Image (spheres, rainbow, N blue to C red):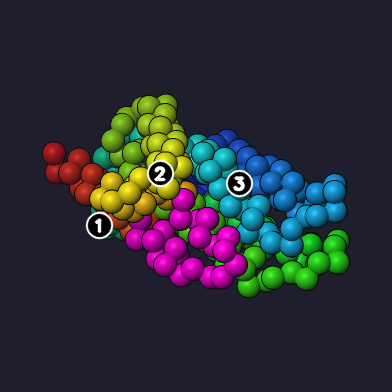
């Protein structure tokens, strides 16, 4: 798994898509950080997590840039046969690629950890460090869940473009579903709430850590990693 991880991470950073993804995430979050925390009317918030909540959909909308090549490129270049011949399990191959993609996403998230310190220096506000870092961690976990979804989509198509567009459609669909959840009741309201990935992160905006939110994102990521393993193994033996 380590060899797959190192190869995938190096190839990602040497290409265009991963650095572009990092730059976009930085740009989108910084826009919301400025709007939420450095308002010209003097009422900027000391809560960094509010900026991340506002930016979560618009920044993770570009996850397909990162995931579209994970398996689609291998299939297109016929190098997936090399993966099947490696003396490791399909689970190890999938986890190596997944952790490499999550590491790329962790780069901007690590930089966001300095934002509460920046607010401390530039403003007179009392910074709620616990909630700020809980928000950053939750934002990272939400990204890991969306990456797992995009990676699964990458196993379904040989074309990177189709993989990216399908992942984009799923991300937008989940966002829309999260917005209509509040208007649904009963069984369908429960179903919509269960799959509302972007709606979950709003729970941390109530001013206290919500560990069920973190568990939800970890479970969603694990589920789609499992789906990816099954899709990979099906192609190996077909």
Q: Would you name the residue on which mark 3 appears? A: 55
Write the start and end of the magenta stretch as one range: 199-220
- Identify which residue is drawn at 31% across, 31% down: 157
Q: For residue 106, which quarter of the picture?
A: bottom right
The answer to whether residue 192 is visible is yes
Q: Would you name the residue on which mark 1 appears? A: 89
Residue 127 locus on image (x, y percent): 74, 69
- Identify which residue is drawn at 41% across, 59% down: 217
Q: Would you name the residue on which mark 2 appears? A: 183
- Residue 42 or residue 122, whichever sits in front: 42
Q: Earlier in the sequence, mark 3 or mark 1?
A: 3
Residue 75 locus on image (x, y percent): 31, 34
Disc 3 to disc 1: CB gap under 8 Å: no
Q: Earlier in the sequence, mark 2 or mark 3?
A: 3
- Local SS, label 3: helix
Q: For residue 171, which quarter of the picture?
A: top left
**Label 2 vs label 3: CA separation?**
23 Å
């Amino acid at each position: 798994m380590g060899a797959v991880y190192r190869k995938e991470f190096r190839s990602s950073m040497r290409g265009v898509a991963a650095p572009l993804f990092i730059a976009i995430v930085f740009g989108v979050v910084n826009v919301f950080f400025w709007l939420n925390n450095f308002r010209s009317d003097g009422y900027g918030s000391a809560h960094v997590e509010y900026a991340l909540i506002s930016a979560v959909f618009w920044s993770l909308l570009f996850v397909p840039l990162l995931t579209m090549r994970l398996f689609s490129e291998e299939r297109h270049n016929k190098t997936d046969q090399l993966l099947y011949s490696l003396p490791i399990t399909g689970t190890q191959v999938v986890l190596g690629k997944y952790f490499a993609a999550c590491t790329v996403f962790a780069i901007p998230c690590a930089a966001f950890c300095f934002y509460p310190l920046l607010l401390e220096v530039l403003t007179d506000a009392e910074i709620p460090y616990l909630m700020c870092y809980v928000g950053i961690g939750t934002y990272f976990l939400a990204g890991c869940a969306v990456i797992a979804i995009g990676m699964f989509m990458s196993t379904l198509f040989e074309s990177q473009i189709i993989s990216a567009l399908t992942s984009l459609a799923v991300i937008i669909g989940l966002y829309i579903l999260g917005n209509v959840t509040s208007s649904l009741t009963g069984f369908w309201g429960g179903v919509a709430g269960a799959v509302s990935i972007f709606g979950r992160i709003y729970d941390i905006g109530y001013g206290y850590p919500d560990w069920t939110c973190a568990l939800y994102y970890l479970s969603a990521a694990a589920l789609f990693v499992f789906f990816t393993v099954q899709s990979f193994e099906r192609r190996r033996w077909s």
